């Protein structure tokens, strides 16, 4: 992790701690520039983009909490948390994973550049290649729940090590994506940057319809997604998400009352 030698780290950014989460308060353009500038030869490390659900996951999963606390770059994926933090006089920045990934494919990754993708269906990756003219994709899709299957984890690690790339897109949700990236760090063979991106590829190629812009602007993407898939997503948004929002509102109030500061982790 980033507690390892400082050569792992290209740049150090000020950290903001909010709702039990750690953020580098970067704009989207700043985050993309940082990701694009990271040399491919550096030892493997992680980009994560926390949202309100991550606050619940970090409280419930010690391993996920340790990984998230040490990721090379951690940018805000939630307009709801951004608005809550603003009440406390704190700017979290806003650089969601799907937006970062979209700009990387639009502006940064050349069609012939080697990229590695872990997770995602074959048809989704084929659509991605067609839409962006990509000709050098290495794709491996582990079985469901593979993080608890040592042989499947080993196979995925071997695949990444055998297909070095500046960007390794880990197309699965938290905490599985972060835990897999941690296994890669511990293995020590991989280089480049692991981007824990969930379903971002499906979104940018149009397989998952985006929320209307007015909902995006008002932080209501969660409501749009919940309305589309209530059975699958109600726990994520109505239980885990509101738990994280509640922690954020408590922090915002504490900041306003000067009972704590955002530059220190919550205790």
Image: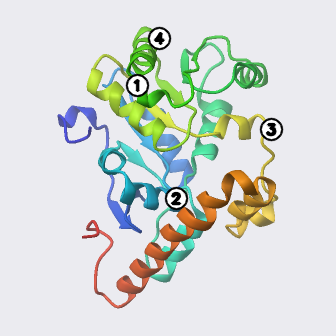
Q: Which comes sooner in the sequence, label 4 or label 2?
A: 2
Cα separation between marks 3 and 4: 27 Å
Cα separation between marks 3 and 1: 27 Å
Instruction: From the image, tell me which residue sits under label 2.
Output: 53
**Can residue 22 be seen by looking at this rendering?**
no
**Can residue 129 be seen by looking at this rendering?**
yes
Q: Residue at x 47, y 37 (%)?
A: 176
Q: Is residue 154 left or right of residue 75?
A: left
Comparing marks 4 and 2, which lies closer to the viewer?
2
- Give the structural element (helix, strand or loop) at label 4: loop
Q: Quadrant of residue 155?
A: top left
Instruction: From the image, tell me which residue sits under label 4.
Output: 163
Instruction: From the image, tell me which residue sits under label 3.
Output: 206
Q: Which comes sooner in the sequence, label 1 or label 2?
A: 2
User: Where does residue 5 sit, x and y in percent of width and height?
Assistant: 17, 34
Q: Residue at x 44, y 30 (%)?
A: 147
Of the pair 1 and 66, the residue shown nearer to us: 66
Number of residues whose C-alpha sits closer than 10 Å to that of mark 4, classed few (under 14), some (14–19) or many (20 or more): some
Instruction: Quadrant for the N terminus, please.
Output: top left
Instruction: From the image, tell me which residue sits under label 1.
Output: 192
User: Where does residue 113 sit, x and y in percent of width and height?
Assistant: 57, 16
Comparing marks 3 and 2, which lies closer to the viewer?
2
Comparing marks 4 and 1, which lies closer to the viewer?
4
């Amino acid at each position: 992790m980033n507690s390892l030698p400082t050569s792992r780290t290209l740049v150090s950014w000020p950290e903001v701690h909010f709702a039990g989460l750690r953020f580098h308060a970067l704009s989207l353009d700043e985050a993309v520039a940082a990701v694009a500038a990271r040399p491919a030869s550096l030892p493997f490390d992680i980009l994560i983009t926390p949202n309100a659900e991550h606050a619940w996951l970090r409280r419930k999963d010690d391993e996920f909490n340790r990984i998230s606390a040490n990721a090379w770059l951690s940018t805000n994926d939630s307009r709801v948390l951004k608005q809550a933090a603003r009440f406390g006089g704190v700017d979290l920045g806003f650089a969601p994973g799907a937006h970062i990934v979209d700009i990387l494919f639009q502006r940064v990754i050349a069609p012939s550049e080697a990229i590695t993708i872990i997770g995602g269906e074959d048809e989704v990756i084929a659509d991605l290649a067609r839409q962006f003219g990509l000709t050098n994709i290495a794709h491996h899709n582990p079985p469901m729940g593979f993080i608890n299957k040592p042989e499947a984890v080993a196979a995925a690690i071997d695949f990444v090590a055998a297909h070095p790339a500046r960007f390794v897109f880990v197309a699965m949700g938290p905490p599985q994506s972060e835990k897999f990236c941690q296994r890669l760090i511990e293995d020590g063979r991989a280089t480049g940057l692991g981007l824990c991106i969930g379903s971002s590829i499906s979104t940018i190629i149009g397989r998952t319809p985006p929320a209307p812009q007015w909902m995006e602007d008002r932080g209501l993407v969660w409501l749009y997604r919940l309305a589309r898939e209530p059975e699958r997503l109600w726990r994520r948004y109505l239980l885990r998400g509101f738990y994280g929002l509640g922690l954020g509102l408590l922090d915002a109030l504490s900041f306003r009352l000067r009972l704590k500061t955002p530059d220190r982790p919550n205790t």
